[in-house]
Image (cartoon, helix red, strand yellow):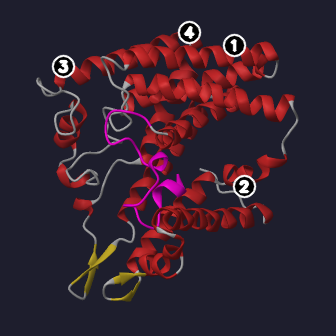
Amino acid sequence: MIIVNTPGDGSVTFAPLLHAKWHGFTPTDLVFPSFLFAVGNAMSFVMRKWEQKTTAQVLAKIFKRTLLIFLLGYLMYWFPFVNNDEGHWALSPISNTRILGVLQRIALCYCFASLLIYFLKTRTVVVISAGLLLLYWGLCFWFGDPFDPLSLQGNAGLKLDLWLMGESHLYHGEGVAFDPEGLLSTLPAIVNVVGGYLVGLHVQKNGKSYEGLAKLLLAGFTLVVIAYFWNFIFPINKKLWTSSFVLHTVGLDCMIIAAVIYITDIQQKTRWAGFFEVVGKNPLSIYLLSELLVIVLYMVHVNPDTSLFAWIYQTIFSHAGAYWGSLLFAVCYMLLCWSVGYWMDKKKIYLRV
C-alpha cells in the first residue's frame, strides 16, 4: 500500500501499481480487501479470549476499538489541522474534512463483523453475508441512475453519501466528489472480514494439512469462478466495492493464504518472512507514519514552487528514469517506514488499539 500511495511521480507509474480506473481489477486492488481479510483472520484467534469475558466487556472492547480506529482515520485526513492562506496560518475547517476513508472502513467493517460473529452462529453469519452481497447488488440497481446505475456520478452509494454528508466531506481524487470508501459500499466490505474469519477457523481446525489446504484452494477457486460469471452483470469494481469484487478478492486471499501456509508450515521455509513480520507487528503505526510523513514532505518547500517531496524525487530518483525512478522513490520511502517499524520491534514497542 505504501509503494502504491507514494510514487515519486504518479503520472509515470507501472500499470500493476495502479488501481483499475473503474470496472476491472489490478494487483493493487487486492491490497485493501486483504487488510479486511486479515482483520477477520486475526479475529478468529481472539474469539477464545472473548468467551472468558462478559458481554458488556466484549462490547466495550469492540466499540472502543472501532471508535479509536475511526477517529485516527478522521484525524489523519484533517492533518495538519492548519493551512496557509496568502501567508496567514489558520485552522483547517472541519467542514471540508473527509469523513470516511481507509481506516474508517476498517473500523466499521470490524465493528459489524465482530457483532455478527459474537452474537450469531457461524451458519447464520454465512447466510447474512450472502444476503449482504445480494442486498447491495439490488440497492445499486434500484437506487442508482436508471440509465447508468454503476457510473461514477450515477451510483447509489454517491447519492447516499451526498445526502448524509455533503460534497465537501467526500473524497475528490476522482475529479469529482465521490468516496470509494463510502457508507453504502461498506456493506459488502463486511463480508471480506467475515471471509477472513471463516478461513481462520478452518486453518485452526485442519488448515495445516494437505487436505485442509486443498479445501482452502478449492474454496478460493470456486469463489473466483463465481465472481467471474457475476462480473458479466455486476462488474468487478474496487471503487464501488461490488459483490463480485468481494468474492473475487476473498477467493484470491484464500489461495494466497493456502500458499503461505504451505511454504511456512509444511515446507518450513520461514527465513523470508522476517521482513514482513516487522510491518505485521505494528501495521497501524507504520500506515499512519507513511500517510502523515508524506503530507509533511509536501508541506515543506525548498522554494516557492517546489515541495521537499518533489525536490527529493527530482534531485535523486528522477535520474533513474521516469518509471523506474518513480518506483525507486516509492520503494525507498516504504523502506524508510519499514525501518521505523524495525526499530520499534527491536525496542519491543507495539502500539495497539
User: How far is disc 3 from disc 1 in space, using C-alphas?
Assistant: 37 Å
**Is 42 above or below relative to 272?**
above
- Which badge, 2 or 3, is on the more N-terminal residue? 3
- Which badge, 3 or 1, is on the more N-terminal residue? 3
The residue at which mark 2 appears reads as 278
The residue at which mark 3 appears reads as 142
SS assignment at label 4: helix
The residue at which mark 4 appears reads as 123
Q: Which mark is residue 150?
A: none
- Which badge, 4 or 2, is on the more N-terminal residue? 4
Q: How many other residues sit within 10 Å of disc 1, few (<14), some (14-19) or many (≥20)?
A: some
Q: How many other residues sit within 10 Å of disc 2, few (<14), some (14-19) or many (≥20)?
A: many
**Residues drawn in magenta:** 1-25
Question: Residue 199 lies in magenta, yes or no?
Answer: no
Q: Quadrant for residue 297, please give it.
A: bottom left
Task: Point out residue 277 in the picture as x, y percentages from the top left corner.
Answer: 74, 50
